Amino acid sequence: MQVQNLIANTVLRRKTGNSKARITNMVVPTKVEHIYEDTIMWFMKVLFGFAMVVIYVPLVYRITYRIVSQNESRAKDTMRVMGMSMLPYWLSWFATYTIMNLTVVVLVTLLSAMNLMSP
């Protein structure tokens, strides 16, 4: 039972003094003559999930490729020998790819908003 319905029933019973009084919720379907088919809704239902995954595939590929190539070239070990700690190394990776992902997210959000807001 919904909280709103429970409160409404309690108020009704107190106001009427009838302990068996109750309010019920019901949904009544109505006839609609014409349903407008929106193409953006079709896109959202069918392709949006797939598009969200595909957008991030190049970013994940790039991260994986660059980390593996740095491990092959021993760049991280060289930096550690030169006195660099691991915190700046991983923070640089985090900052770089946070900026890249944030750019993609902002662009996708703007494009989606423009499509949703257009008449």
Image (cartoon, grey):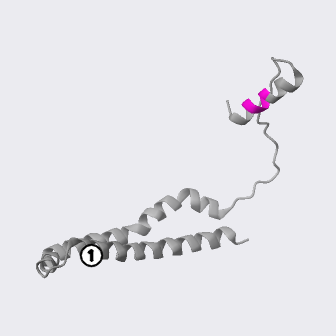
- Residue 50 position within the rendered picture, expressed as x and y whole percent measured from the top left: 47, 61
**Quick one: SS at disc 1?**
helix
Q: Is residue 62 visible in this depiction of the protein?
A: no
Give the answer, above or below, for where 66 lies relative to 25. below
Instruction: Name the residue type under label 1.
Output: Pro
The N terminus: image quadrant:
top right
Side (left or right) of 80 relative to 27: left
Q: Residue at x 70, y 59 (%)?
A: 37
Side (left or right) of 16 relative to 75: right
- Residue 19 position within the rendered picture, expressed as x and y whole percent measured from the top left: 81, 17
Region rendered in magenta: 6-10
- Residue 98 position within the rendered picture, expressed as x and y whole percent measured from the top left: 40, 72
Q: Which residue is mark 1?
A: 88
- Magenta span: helix, strand or loop, mainly? helix
Q: Is residue 68 visible in this depiction of the protein?
A: yes
Q: Residue at x 89, y 23 (%)?
A: 16
Q: Residue at x 44, y 69 (%)?
A: 55
